[in-house]
Amino acid sequence: MNGRKQQLLKRHRRNKRIALLGALPVLVLLGVLVAWWLPPLLLVLGWVAHEAWFADHLFYSPRDDYRYDFPADCLSVPARLEQGVLRVDAELDGHDTLILELRLEATWLGRWLDPHVLFGGDRQDFERGVAGRRYLNLSGQKVDGLALVPRFCRIHGEPRLHAMRNPDYAGQRLLIVAPHADDAELAAFGLYSRAAEVAIVTLTQGEIEAEHYQRLGLEKAAAARLKGRLRAWDSLAAPLWGGVSQARCVQLGYYCLQLPAMAAAPEQPFASRESGESDIRSVRQYNPLTLPADDDGLPTWRNLVADLGAVLEHFRPEVVLTPHPELDPHHDHVASTQALLEAVAACAWQPQTLLLYANHLHDNDRWPMGPAGNGIALPPAITALPADRLWSPVLDAEQQLDKAMALALQHDLQGPLPLKKRLRRSIQRLLAGRRWPASGEDEFFRKAVRRHELFWVRPIGR
């Protein structure tokens, strides 16, 4: 998490503690004046209610408007609803990404069950208690004559359609920058599995938080080294499921959560926080090309930027996929895009386009909301983002299944859920009507396996 998200989470937990401390005197009073068993009963009911309806990390009001500015080449036209049927008087041929702006207001049930809109075999969910401007992703739909059926919410005002035209980037040379093993699959498996020419560079080993491997009788450092080896292997092996050979996958071997520190002191090496290792060459033996940092193996920012420059020169991509620097808050994701842009600035080979993705958000841990297999509505943007064009290719059922299996190959997404999360899911399934897919227990199987993938399109140099 970055600093902003850490602050939001601290405030969220502090507010919960304050509420609990405020309730304790009332519970004690009820126990004295009414019955001794009433406070324990109310505590259990309160915990169940919290897990069902108040456990989401939502760091903004559901009544806030989303704020999106679209680029000048976006076709933005008024639309109308006639007895629940969408009408658009515009020629949309050639426009591949279609976003419907509308105002939603939750009904009273929509404060307890997830509000959503059904249309064309799709379902897109929003925050409980929603009351503001939101954006449906209609890409892949025939919009004129499309029936919109709101559940646990109402549509107010006149909607507006934003239509964008993109080339099919799968036909261009692609390079995917993945801060960790699994980031490429989460963001873009559907895209890269049908791309004509794609390479994937993974920046870190992913060795931290290896407690699960200590169950094998390993000390903390040994468990971290094992996890780093496994995830480095994942970064080279899992793409083959999507048709990307090992010869087009590169593992740089830097260390998790050290990239921001490296950026702040470019010449200083930063060893792993947990594995005890300081030589990044330990996981580079299968790389298809020689890289600058192979000489000394030092985990420095200067070496990282030089490595990325060598990768750019070797694969000569026209399009580079990288984390969204304003939207995705993960420390390593922000630093990965920073390193890429520094490498591009110093490189003779110049890609033309960035495709930006977000596997994490500042403000909403559940986005994309709703069950797996549905579309991806636009994420919350309470402060307006840069006015990038959007591209949202569609994945059919077979591609979604292949994407789920690609995620199942990732060691970091295989572990069993903690008991607390299992209980929470059971309560939410019973009381809030939520559902999770059978393909895997990790939350990313719900969030990432969708009808759409979503990218922000930014020309290099902006």
Image (spheres, rainbow, N blue to C red):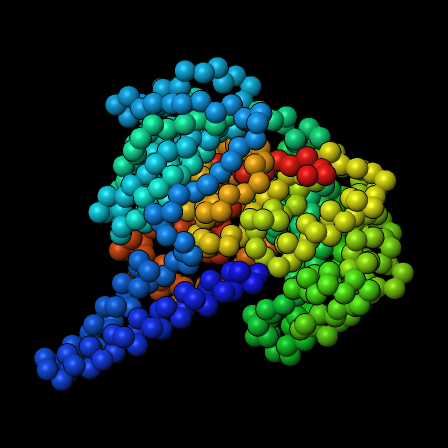
Instruction: State the image coordinates of residue 139 (x, y, percent, origin top left).
Output: 48, 29
Q: Residue at x 22, y 80 (%)?
A: 25
Instruction: State the image coordinates of residue 293 (x, y, percent, origin top left).
Output: 85, 58
- Compare residues 360 and 447 and report the one nearer the observer: 360
Say which quadrant the N terminus sits in: bottom right
- Compare residues 79 and 126 and report the one nearer the observer: 79
Residue 49 quadrant? bottom left
Task: Indicate left or right for 5 with 174 as reference.
Answer: left
Does residue 186 appear anywhere in the picture? no
Q: Residue at x 68, y 28 (%)?
A: 171
Does residue 74 appear anywhere in the picture? yes
Q: Residue at x 83, y 43 (%)?
A: 347
Task: Indicate left or right for 202 with 267 as reference.
Answer: left
**Can you say whether 389 is above or below 221 in the image?**
above
Task: Indicate left or right for 175 with 419 as reference.
Answer: right
**Can you say whether 132 is above or below 292 in the image?**
above
Q: Residue at x 66, y 31 (%)?
A: 170
Say which quadrant the C terminus sits in: top right
**Can you say whether 325 is above or below 413 in the image?**
above
